[in-house]
Amino acid sequence: MAEILLLRHAKSDHPSGEADRDRPLTSRGERSARAIGRAISGFGATPDLILTSPARRAADTAALARDGGGWSAPIITVENFYGTGVTAVLDALADHTTAGRIVAVGHEPTWSATVSALIGGGAIHMVTAAVACVETALPATPGSGWLRWMLHPRLFTDPA
């Protein structure tokens, strides 16, 4: 069994004229990304591998969470994590069946839909910088996992 930690990118800005893929994190997003990395480590869930969308806000979230959590796991950019659906995410995860714990950083609504699919249904809504830990066999298939825990970043950051 493996643990897949689906981490939605942290709060991003919407600068005028900025392409969607190039949107940066806000200062709150940066704090949340670091804090959720520390929280993941506090749960003893240090990843073996980090997969991220190529969008700047996701890649920055992955790097800041890794720094905040003190992880040494490599970060791999997965093009199919941007503008995609559940099947593409599961296919990308299937390429890494030897990892025991993977943090996958991406976007809504795909991340909520992926958690829901893995656990066999249910209404899931992932706010920015939320992380859901699903235990499943790899390659993962719909209904093959169970939700171990889900964390909201406001549990670990200043509410401002």
Image (cartoon, grey):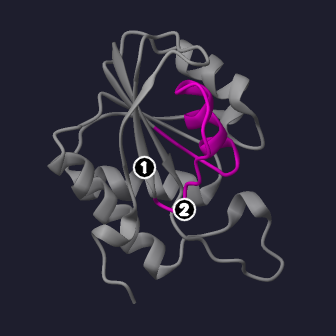
Q: Position of residue 150 (x, y in %)?
A: 38, 48
Measured in 3D between alpha carbons, the distance from the residue under mark 2 to the one under mark 1, in whole angstroms, is 9 Å
Instruction: Give me the disc on residue 131.
Output: 1
Q: Measured along the vertical axis of the image, is residue 127 above or below residue 86?
A: below
Tell me: 118 left or right of 135: right
For residue 115, what is the image quadrant?
A: top right
Q: Position of residue 9 (x, y in %)?
A: 54, 56
Q: In the image shown, does 159 or 89 lie closer to the viewer?
A: 159
Q: Please, what is the three-letter code of the amino acid marked with disc 1?
A: Val
Residue 33 belongs to magenta span: no
Crowding around mark 1 (Cα neighbors within 10 Å: few <14, some 14 to 19, many 20+) is many
Q: Position of residue 4 (x, y in %)?
A: 42, 29
Q: In the image shown, does 24 or 129 lie closer to the viewer?
A: 129
Q: In the image shown, does 57 or 40 lie closer to the viewer?
A: 40
Q: Which residue is mark 2?
A: 127
Q: Residue at x 24, y 38 (%)?
A: 72
Q: Measured along the vertical axis of the image, is residue 95 above or below residue 12?
A: above
Tell me: 83 left or right of 1: right
As drawn, the residue found furthest toward the bottom would be 160
Quarter of the image for the N terminus: give it.
Answer: top left
Q: Magenta region: which residues?
A: 104-129
Residue 112 belongs to magenta span: yes
Q: Position of residue 160 (x, y in %)?
A: 40, 90
Q: Please, what is the three-letter code of the amino acid marked with disc 2?
A: Val
Crowding around mark 2 (Cα neighbors within 10 Å: few <14, some 14 to 19, many 20+) is some
Tell me: 139 left or right of 151: right
Q: Secondary structure at mark 1?
A: strand
